[in-house]
Amino acid sequence: MVQARASERKQRPPRAVTAYLRPKQTPRRVVWQDRIADWTISIGGLAVILAVIGIMAFLVDVVVPLFLGGRVVASHRYELPKTSGRPLLVLADEEGILAGRIDEGGTFTSFHLPSGREIQALALNLGPTRVTAFARTIQGGDLIFGFADGSVRFARLDFDGRIVAATDVPPDARALEAGHRTDGAAVYAALPGGQMRRVAAKLELLEAEAVSPTGRPIVALDYRVGGNRERPTRAVVAVDEAGAILLTRSESRLNLLTRELTTDVRRSVLPPVAVGSTVVGVLLTQRADEVLLGKADGTLHRFDVRDFDRPVLAETRDVAPGRAEITSLGFLIGEQSVVVGTSTGDVHVYFRVAAPEARTTDGRALVLAHELEPHAGAVTAFTPSERSKAFATADANGAVWLRHATSEQVLLRPGAERRADVTALSLASRDDGIVTLDSSHTATYWRISAPHPETTLQTIFGRVWYEGYPEPTHTWQSSSGTDVFEPKFSLVPLIFGTLKATVYSLLFAVPLALLAAVYTSEFIHPRVRATVKPAMEMMASLPSVVLGFIAALVLAPLVETWIASVLLFLAAFPFTLLAGAVLWQALPTRLALLLEGVPKLGAMVVAIGLAALLSQQLGAPFEDAFFGGDFRLWLDGGRGSGEPLLFLILLPLSFGAVAWLASRLVGDRVDGWLRDATPLAAAAIDGARWLVLFAAAALAASGVASFLSLLGLDPRNGLVGTYVQRNTLVVGFAMGFAVIPIIYTIAEDAMSAVPSHLRAASLACGATPWQTAIRVIVPTATSGIFAGVMVGMGRAVGETMIVVMAAGNTPILDWNVFNGLRALSANIAVELPEAVKDSSLYRMLFLAALTLFAMTFVVNTVAEVVRLRFRRRAAQL
Amino acid sequence: MHRTASLAFVGVLAATAAAAVTVDAALPSYQSKSGISGNLKSIGSDTLNNLMTLWTEGFRAQYPNVQIEIEGKGSSTAPPALVAGTAHFGPMSRPMKGAEIDAFAKKFGYKPAAIRTAVDALAVFVHKDNPVQCLTMPQLDAIFSKTRKGGFPKELRTWGDAGLTGAWASQPISLYGRNSASGTYGYFKETALFDGDYKDTVKEQPGSSTVVQGVASDRNGIGYSGVGYKTADVRTVPIAASEGSECYDATAENAYAGLYPISRFLYVYLNKNPNQPLDPLRSEFVRFVFSKQGQEAVIKDGYFPVTAAVAEEDLDTLGLR
């Protein structure tokens, strides 16, 4: 206890007589409680920050692998037993255990891929004639040989992989590298669970078939096998030395009931374009509806064979610039894109797009879509991937590069520059290995990992030219049921969709909520306030899935049928409310005061209901007068000009301008009349004033609208367009329901918290309640109002269920309010169940989540900064 | 026993009512075994949703102790579920693609097993008042896709472009489809769109019945879904393979003969180790699916049953014969 000094004791007022002398020092218990609370809150706050950073770090961790290219996991190089002929083909099995090599002399060797040890060697009885051409399908196993006597032979190389028990391995099997064993024909690899994988190569050669009518050597071939188990198809195109191009297609159909197989074989001869010796390669599509022929001088001919019996030369194009020659030609999976390699090392990707103005016979043309990084030497070998638009190219210097067509990147450069002439190149079917064979029978095998070749920052945020599209676009179309599909991962339509949903729903929600808050805090009768506020808060508790459900199944069809009435209602209800207010003004003052409160609220509801009824009745005449009878047809752009909609949009703006002008010019005089008049007369003057203002506004709006539409401005070009049932208008209404209560509650609380002495002072100075509200209360409460709007915006950005159900989920880049959208949140919800863990789609969805997170973070931070600035200003009051 | 009898009775009624479609007489009638109990979970195709439910009911009539949960959000949800081990069965209305088989094989070492449980003629639905007689595959491609790989020269935007006259000529075609998780989406994209891309304006619906519902409520609508979801408010459009070919409607004979161009099998994928026998619970469910009662449920759902030959082949691959 501090002893007061004697002097101070004299100056202090006499102490009150109490029995208990209160100690002045804070008790230790309170200090400790204080400290504990301090620490708990600090730790809690830090933990929240750490959790947010942790989430961000986790998202980044899942997303980063998308942007790492490829890497080499292991590499092996060895020499295979030499044979007389040049290698034609090297092919590996799916697991990277066994591989096969075929050469021109007809020798087939299977070898253990990691070590190069020969397992089996067979001599194929190809016959006495020389092999002059060779082709294989993109999926690898089906082969075709072309001979110097104009015949072809089909073959099939299969790697028969089976799971057997560990006891099934023959005891005399000798050991190989990598823990594998072989019994001379098959290789056994251990699997978890005491099982073994047994892989054996199987080569089947069919009889020769004569193809060239004149018996000339075949110079180029292509072979396609397709269809499914019940409807297999097979197609072959052969070019002989004389330049004749022959196409054969066979299609089989299995009748499930009778088990009968009907096969349909058709042959066709294409118009000749070249002498055979200049042909570099020929390509065929699986449906045999297109043939591409490449000549050494750099010309590519495209034949349109959609009408099988009447093939047409559709287009001729020079694809090797200058004096360069085509050295390699091949399709990527899907047979849409063709990769051309030239003698100068250029690698170009072409595909066919619809081009009605091009000088081709079928209205389509080849376009140079991607120019990839050129090799240093001529491109000697090409192999496509079986899973994606990736491919590998080798050049004359021995460099082997793994590339991706759509993202235009080189994923890996595993091949060191050594003077080697790569003659056979193949990519493993799971894109996890590259095998090369050069003319000296040296083989190289790289085990690689490039799991996400199609994503780069450019493909995600920039325009990408996808196969078959006329120009580079932002598209989101993530998956499909087949491997040939090119995944289109652009986040731009999704970000746009989120912004569109937010903008339109805030456009609807913010004015309503803020004006409702102003009304509730400043004008409303206390009894009504007690009813209205809890009702609004209950509105906030509606689950958003229910809102989405009602919006999609009830509201959307309703709005579609009554769209003209809905538009009329938006214009009509301020009108009826104003008319009701003017009529209310005509009531005698005592009656008005008596009915203040709930009856007045009831009258407002009746006014809005009247507006709804009127717009329903007048909807059809309104549609006839403004939109020529059918609003949706008008939106489609068929008839009429954009003037009616421009007029409707400009009407509120022109009303505001005219009202402001009127209040500046004649406001004081009209106020003077109103002050001196009886209530009835005042109501009449007021009503007349509103009517005159409305008429003037309508005139001004129609004048400006005609002027703008003369200038050529038509809202149907961007702002509105074709009508779709599930559109942003419906989403705006539904999200409004979700967002309005939030903005309203926070804004209303902020305005009620304004100290009442300000309100009292303003009213005492003679300001009207409206002037007080707008000029004193709202500016003071701005920080709270702004916070409310920001919380509402955060809710709108993150809202998922309403957007999933009511917005149609179409990823379009269009401000049209009568159109759908696809938001980031809805996209994640809809697509996550189908994403295999750690696949490209999975990581892209996490990137979408990260983008949403970043957007909300940035918006909230900016909002907080602005809010604090407003608060500092208001605190001075 | 009561339940089995009534199910069989309904099955017979449905079989007779569906005129030409009957179950192959060579399919055996299901014989229940003892000692079968446990839980089964199925995650996958929405097209097979009702069918899985009917099989579940029939199976539980035989074995009341078995609990079966069914989730049908789309065929693309089946492979991740089988890989993660959260489902015993993965019904899919399209075959698994290479990347999905790779993901499964990477985890388990062997490939997934598939059984063909029903035949579906993927129907193209229009509003019951729509008079369109026939659409060729290239026309269908030009209506639904923006790439038009089927070769049709121009985009078909209104019903007039598709050949209708009168009041229909100026009405824009309103497109309904499935979302990308769906096997029906993937199968239609591969076959009818010739591996092209859908237009951005196709309204993606989460389920087969919502597609039909959308078309039923929209006069200008056109959509695709399994023929089992047909209701009285829509009609199916006969399809011709190409210009000049004959138009075939989505009926059983056309589907079996391979004449209807977009007919397909409905698959159920499961995880079966090639060297180990299938556990009794799943074996019995597969046997039930390939029995007379199981295939009668297929007819009841509006699809077409498989033949005894197909059933025997698939039972062989699973080692159940």
Image: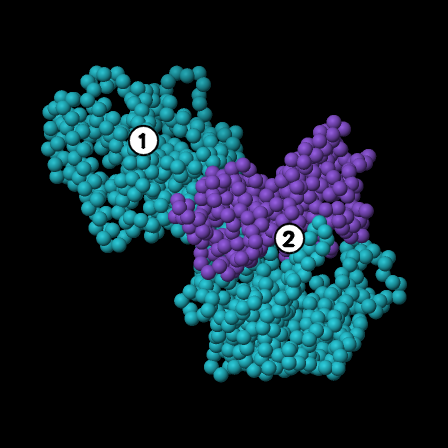
Chain colours: A cyan, B purple
Whole-percent x and y of residue B68? 69, 36
Q: Are discs 2 and 1 less than 8 Å apart at CB?
A: no
Type of the residue with mark 1: Gln
User: Which residue in the structure is indicated by mark 2?
Assistant: B258
Q: CA distance from mark 2 to mark 1?
A: 54 Å
Q: In the picture shown, does residue A344 fall above or below B31?
A: below
Quadrant of the image occupied by residue A185 = bottom right
> Is B69 placed left or right of A8 in the picture?
right
Tell which subunit mark 2 falls on.
Answer: B
Quadrant of the image occupied by residue A332 = bottom right
> Is A712 placed left or right of A376 in the picture?
left
Whole-percent x and y of residue B321? 81, 47
Q: Residue at x 61, y 82 (%)?
A: A241
Q: Tell me the element at label 1.
A: helix
Type of the residue with mark 2: Gly
Whole-percent x and y of residue B307? 72, 46
Whole-percent x and y of residue A457? 49, 60
> Is A764 placed left or right of A408 in the picture?
left
Quadrant of the image occupied by residue A86 = bottom right
Q: Is residue B92 visible?
A: no
User: Which residue in the structure is indicated by mark 1?
Assistant: A617
Q: Residue at x 56, y 42 (%)?
A: B208
In the rendered view of the protein, which quadrant contains the N terminus of chain A?
top left
In the rendered view of the protein, which quadrant contains the C terminus of chain A?
top left
Q: Is residue A220 visible?
A: yes
Q: In the picture shown, does residue A84 fall above or below A461?
A: below
Q: Tell me the element at label 2.
A: loop
Q: Compare residues B193 and A381 and report the one nearer the observer.
A: B193
Q: Residue at x 62, y 74 (%)?
A: A238
Q: Residue at x 72, y 82 (%)?
A: A129
Q: Compare residues A646 and B226 and report the one nearer the observer.
A: B226
